Image (cartoon, rainbow, N blue to C red):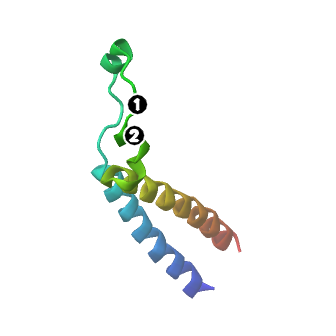
Amino acid sequence: MEIVKYGLIGIYAVVCLALIIVAMMQSKEDGGLSSTMTGSSSSNFYEKNKGRTKEGKLKRWTIILGVIFAILTIALSIVYVM
C-alpha cells in the first residue's frame, strides 16, 4: 500500500506542476469593462475556430489537468484513510 501511496504522490506532484505551468501560459480572455461598453461581438471566424488555436489547446489541457487533479485528490484521500 505504501508503493501506491508514493506513486500517487509522485503523479500528483507532476500534475500540479503541469497545471500551474499551463495556467500561467494562458492569456487573459476577457476584455473587461471596455468590451462590455462597446458591445464587442464574438461571432467571428476566430471565435468559431478557437479550439484549434494555441489558446484553445491550452484551455483544453487546463480542464483535463484540473479533472485529473481532482480525481487524484480524491484517490489520495481514500488511500490515506485506509
- Residue 64, above or below 26: below
Pointers 1 and 2 in contact (CB under 8 A)?
A: yes
Q: Which residue is more in the foreground, 49 or 61?
A: 49
Q: Residue at x 63, y 63 (%)?
A: 74
11 on left or right of 77: left
61 on left or right of 32: right
Residue 57 location, x and y as percent? 38, 57
13 on left or right of 32: right
Q: Residue at x 60, y 69 (%)?
A: 76
Q: Which residue is more in the foreground, 2 or 4?
A: 4
The CA span between labels 1 and 2 is: 6 Å
Residue 58 location, x and y as percent? 37, 55
Q: Residues within 10 Å of mark 1 (few under 14, many from 20)?
A: few
Residue 62 location, x and y as percent? 43, 55
Disc 2: which residue: 47
**Label of residue 19 in the image:** none
- Disc 2 secondary structure class: helix
Q: Residues within 10 Å of mark 2 (few under 14, many from 20)?
A: few
The mark total stands at 2
- Disc 1 secondary structure class: loop
Location of residue 32 by image quarter:
top left
Residue 39 location, x and y as percent? 38, 17
Disc 1: which residue: 42
The amino acid type of the residue labelled 2 equals: Glu
- Position of the C terminus, as image quadrant, is bottom right
- Residue 5, above or below 76: below
